[in-house]
Image: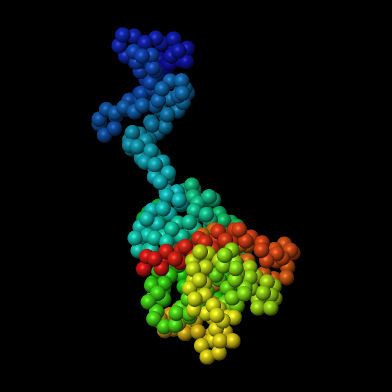
């Protein structure tokens, strides 16, 4: 006879465990402790089996009966309810381990052995800042193209067009890894390229982050002009235009306060530009002070000290060390912009550092010292990155 809730509630524990039957394999085991647990007994492949449905209270009589009917339905289809439950639990665990973040970290761990430490950190930081907060906890196979597109468009809305492109590419690598390892069936990233803004074509060859260690090593071993070698380093650490560096005058520098003010007449936009100097940049200028401090110009011409070093001096160094067609003096600005955007620094700081300022920028009010504290912090980080390459190679 089927059980009732009143009968179950009145059932008291005995000296030994005993069972109350509800029928069709469902029973309630009354433990000596008073705990009442649901059991479903059945036969599969000619062998007796038993599966627990939980404890009475949290699992009501009606719920236990529903579980019984589900199990009986599985048996009718030739499915072992116990094995089906185990498979379900494994699927839940698999889903928990198949989030975008979990798979991205797994992919990163596999790839970082072939990267430099600094480059590996920059890739991870790119994902941590731009993707994990929005899609990190989502099951990777459930992420739709539209969801990924909306996240990438948020990056574009910050003005970081190239960063959005880079993030899309990295996501594509993670999705591709998930597909290869059987955790996803589709990689939406490549199809989104046409939906994003196209980064401006850059006509100057530039270096990527993972190319910098080898470049720094080669530059350090350059045995030509010390002044031109230091000019190349300073160009990398400040992000100024080549002409702004070549024509720099000692009177523009306040080394004690680590600041360089380029007057308006020397700037492309005809506005004064304040450049925070990292510790490494100041160190280079101290070295140059010994070499050219008696001249008005920081980088005087070889044949005429009253004129700046020649326009092709830095690119000649790059050619001599084997980087012709791979890097240019102006390209260092693009390298800086790419790396700093990937690290998640404020786009306004980066654009100000590169003097990308037009007449209507900064919400209509131009202040050449704006964002100075933030840019000091940013340039210290960037110079430390370059300096670490120099120290480690």
Tell me which colouring the rendered structure shows.
rainbow
Q: Farthest residue in the bottom direction? A: 303
Q: Farthest residue in the left direction? A: 46
Q: Position of residue 26 (x, y in %)?
A: 37, 22
Q: Farthest residue in the front direction? A: 294
Q: Position of residue 268 (x, y in %)?
A: 66, 77
263 or 358, which is in the foreground? Answer: 263
Side (left or right) of 372 relative to 140? right
255 or 179, which is in the foreground? Answer: 255
Q: Is 121 drawn above or below residue 54 in the view shown?
A: below
The C terminus lies in which quarter of the figure? bottom left
Look at 35% across and 57% down and name the residue there: 110
Side (left or right) of 355 relative to 34? right
Look at 40% across and 25% down and name the residue there: 54
Look at 38% across and 53% down and name the residue there: 106
The N terminus lies in which quarter of the figure? top left
Q: Position of residue 85 (x, y in %)?
A: 37, 35
Q: Quadrant of residue 360?
A: bottom right
Side (left or right) of 342 relative to 251? left
Q: Position of residue 376 (x, y in %)?
A: 57, 61
Q: Is 297 drawn above or below residue 344 in the view shown?
A: below
């Amino acid at each position: 006879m089927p059980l009732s809730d009143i009968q179950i509630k009145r059932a008291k524990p005995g000296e030994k465990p005993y069972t109350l039957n509800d029928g069709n394999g469902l029973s309630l085991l009354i433990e000596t402790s008073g705990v009442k647990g649901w059991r479903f007994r059945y036969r599969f492949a000619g062998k007796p089996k038993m599966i627990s449905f939980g404890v009475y209270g949290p699992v009501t009589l009606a719920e236990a009966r529903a579980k019984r009917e589900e199990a009986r339905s599985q048996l009718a289809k030739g499915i072992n309810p116990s094995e089906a439950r185990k498979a379900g639990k494994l699927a839940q665990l698999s889903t928990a381990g198949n989030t975008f973040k979990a798979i991205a970290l797994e992919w990163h761990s596999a790839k970082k052995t072939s990267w430099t430490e600094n480059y590996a950190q920059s890739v991870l930081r790119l994902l941590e800042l731009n993707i994990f907060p929005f899609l990190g906890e989502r099951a990777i196979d459930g992420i739709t193209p539209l969801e990924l597109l909306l996240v990438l468009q948020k990056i574009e809305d910050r003005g970081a067009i190239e960063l959005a492109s880079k993030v899309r590419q990295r996501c594509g690598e993670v999705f591709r890894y998930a597909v290869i390892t059987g955790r996803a069936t589709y990689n939406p990233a490549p199809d989104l390229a046409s939906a994003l803004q196209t980064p401006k074509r850059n006509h100057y060859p530039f270096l990527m982050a993972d190319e910098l260690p080898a470049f720094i090593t080669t530059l350090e071993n350059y045995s030509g002009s010390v002044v031109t070698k230091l000019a190349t380093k300073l160009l990398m650490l400040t992000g100024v235009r080549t002409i702004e560096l070549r024509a720099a005058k000692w009177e523009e520098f306040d080394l004690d306060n680590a600041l360089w003010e380029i007057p308006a007449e020397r700037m492309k936009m005809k506005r004064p530009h304040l450049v925070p100097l990292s510790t490494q940049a100041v160190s280079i200028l101290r070295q140059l002070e010994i070499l050219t401090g008696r001249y008005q110009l920081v980088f005087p011409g070889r044949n005429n000290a009253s004129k700046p070093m020649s326009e092709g001096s830095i690119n000649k160094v790059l050619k001599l060390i084997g980087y012709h067609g791979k890097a240019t003096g102006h390209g260092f600005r693009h390298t800086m912009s790419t790396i700093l955007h990937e690290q998640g620094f404020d786009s306004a700081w980066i654009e100000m550092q590169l003097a990308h300022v037009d007449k209507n920028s900064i919400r209509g009010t131009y202040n050449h010292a704006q964002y100075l504290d933030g840019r000091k912090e940013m340039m210290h980080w960037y110079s430390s990155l370059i300096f670490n390459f120099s120290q480690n190679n």
